Amino acid sequence: ILNGEGTQGIAITVKGILEKALNKNAKVINVKETKNADSFNYNVTKILIHTEKEGVQIVAEQIKKILGVGAISQSSNNPDNVDITLIIGSDYTK
């Protein structure tokens, strides 16, 4: 989870929200890392899928539903070796 809009601590806050919602009955997600994105200029929250694994698209859609924002897309740029990268943009206001 990357902070792409600059509010201090937002990536950790979102991590808690997603883990609480998605791991309620069974462990669905494992957040590897929270850190700043390459800039704080993201206006739109991005949910980047890096794999064709079964169920990952569904998890991405659940993330979008929980956050209330997010543009889901495929990305082959995966320096962190994860299934999904979430970049929080300024459209996220919770």
Image (cartoon, grey):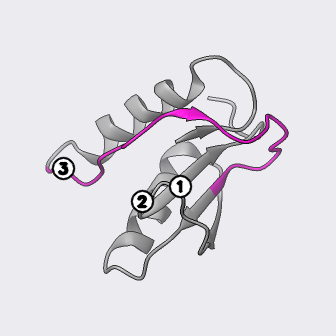
Q: Residue type at mark 3: give it.
A: Lys
Number of callouts: 3
Q: Nearer the viewer, residue 5 or 64?
A: 5
Q: Residue type at mark 2: give it.
A: Val
13 in relation to 25, above or below: above
Residue 17 locus on image (x, y percent): 41, 33
Region of the chain picked out in magenta, as a range: 26-46
Residue 4 locus on image (x, y percent): 71, 38
Query: SS for tag 3?
Result: loop
Disc assigned to residue 85: 1
Q: Residue type at mark 1: give it.
A: Thr
Query: SS for tag 1?
Result: strand
61 inside magenta stretch: no
Residue 6 locus on image (x, y percent): 74, 25
Query: SS for tag 2?
Result: loop
Disc 3 crowd rating (10 Å Cα; few below 14, some 14-19, many 20+) is few
10 in relation to 77, above or below: above
Whole-angstrom CA distance, mark 3 to mark 2, is 16 Å
